[in-house]
């Protein structure tokens, strides 16, 4: 249990049991979600890691990424499990598929390029949503993604939609990639984000959009710490 949660529980306060953090690519969902989870003593689940791992697997196994049925078949055949980040990993979650650690594959360029296309497949999404709901039934958690507040956990105790301008998202994503040793141009990062935003927002199943009861945070003029504090302040106002 985190210090903050322990303090609040001792004071008889209740916290939201599930916290949904949605938003577009590179808005800071994983970094903020992870830190909020740590402060509350909750596990953090980055659902993007699940779609990325399935994308890697589809590419490895030669599954046609335009074939929604084949992608659904793949997702229903495999055993997906998630855990906390492994020491030294830049990811906020670790992910195994059929016992193999796929975490190091999540940011590969071929995964970046295909993940939004793969994530359109309705049957694949159904398989992922079933796992996500099962994990949420086990206990409190912070879950980040695109459709958490709208589809996966419509009754989440707190829903945050984290947004930022394109310029800011490009700047942050490029910084992350450079830190991982990948020399990418601003234009390339912008192209990738625009491509993913457009597919994620326009797909038929579970498109990216804020839930009607989500609280929208625009993080352009806020530091990561300030966003974390804002989300934590919102947990005070909610009981669930
Ligand atoms: O959050 P991320 O950039 O790691 O997500 C990668 C892709 O996965 C994103 O472009 C769309 C998809 N995704 C999704 O469709 N639904 C989610 N809940 C999370 C991610």
Image (cartoon, grey):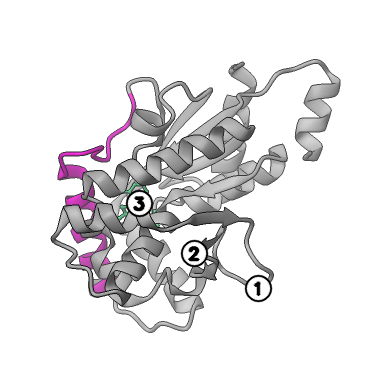
Range shown magenta: 188-211
Q: Position of residue 60 (x, y in %)?
A: 32, 76
Instruction: Tell me which corner region of the image, top left, top right, bottom left or bottom right, holds residue 160.
Output: top left
Answer with mark 3 or mark 1, whichever residue precedes in sequence. 3
| Crowdedness near tag 2: few (<14), some (14–19) or many (≥20) residues, C-alpha within 10 Å | few
- From the viewer's perspective, is residue 49 above or below residue 212? below
Please state if 6 lies on the left or on the right of 57 as rendered.
Answer: right
Q: Secondary structure at mark 3?
A: helix
Say if the magenta span includes residue 156: no
What label does residue 76 carry, if any? Answer: 3
Q: Which residue is mark 2?
A: 98
Residues at marks 2 and 1, CA–CA distance in whole angstroms = 23 Å
- From the viewer's perspective, is residue 159 above or below residue 75? above
Q: Residue at x 80, y 15 (%)?
A: 12
- Which of 82/73 is in front? 73
Residues at marks 3 and 1, CA–CA distance in whole angstroms = 31 Å
Q: Residue at x 35, y 69 (%)?
A: 57
Q: Secondary structure at mark 1?
A: loop
What label does residue 75 carry, if any? Answer: none
Answer with mark 2 or mark 1, whichever residue precedes in sequence. 1
Q: Residue at x 26, y 60 (%)?
A: 193
Asked if labels 1 and 3 touch by Cβ distance under 8 angstroms, the answer is no
Task: Name the residue furthest front.
Answer: 77
Q: Which residue is mark 1?
A: 88
Residues at marks 2 and 3, CA–CA distance in whole angstroms = 12 Å
């Amino acid at each position: 249990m985190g210090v903050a949660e322990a303090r609040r529980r001792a004071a008889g306060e209740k916290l939201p049991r599930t916290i949904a953090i949605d938003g577009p690519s590179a808005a800071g969902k994983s970094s903020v979600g992870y830190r909020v989870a740590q402060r509350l003593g909750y596990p953090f689940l980055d659902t993007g890691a699940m779609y990325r791992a399935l994308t890697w697997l589809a590419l490895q196994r030669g599954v046609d990424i335009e074939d929604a049925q084949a992608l659904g078949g793949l997702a229903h055949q495999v055993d997906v499990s998630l855990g906390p980040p492994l020491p030294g990993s830049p990811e906020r979650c670790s992910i195994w598929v059929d016992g193999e650690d796929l975490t190091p594959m999540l940011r590969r360029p071929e995964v970046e390029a295909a993940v939004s296309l793969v994530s359109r497949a309705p049957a694949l999404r159904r398989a992922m949503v079933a796992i996500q709901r099962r994990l949420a039934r086990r206990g409190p958690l912070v879950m980040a993604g695109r459709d958490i507040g709208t589809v996966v956990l419509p009754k989440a105790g707190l829903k945050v939609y984290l947004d930022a301008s394109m310029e800011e998202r490009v700047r942050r994503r490029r910084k992350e990639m450079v830190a991982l040793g990948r020399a990418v141009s601003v234009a390339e990062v912008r192209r990738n984000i625009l491509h993913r935003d457009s597919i994620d927002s326009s797909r038929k199943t579970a498109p990216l959009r804020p839930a009607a009861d989500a609280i929208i945070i625009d993080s352009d003029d806020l530091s990561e710490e300030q966003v974390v504090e804002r989300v934590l302040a919102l947990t005070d106002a909610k009981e669930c």
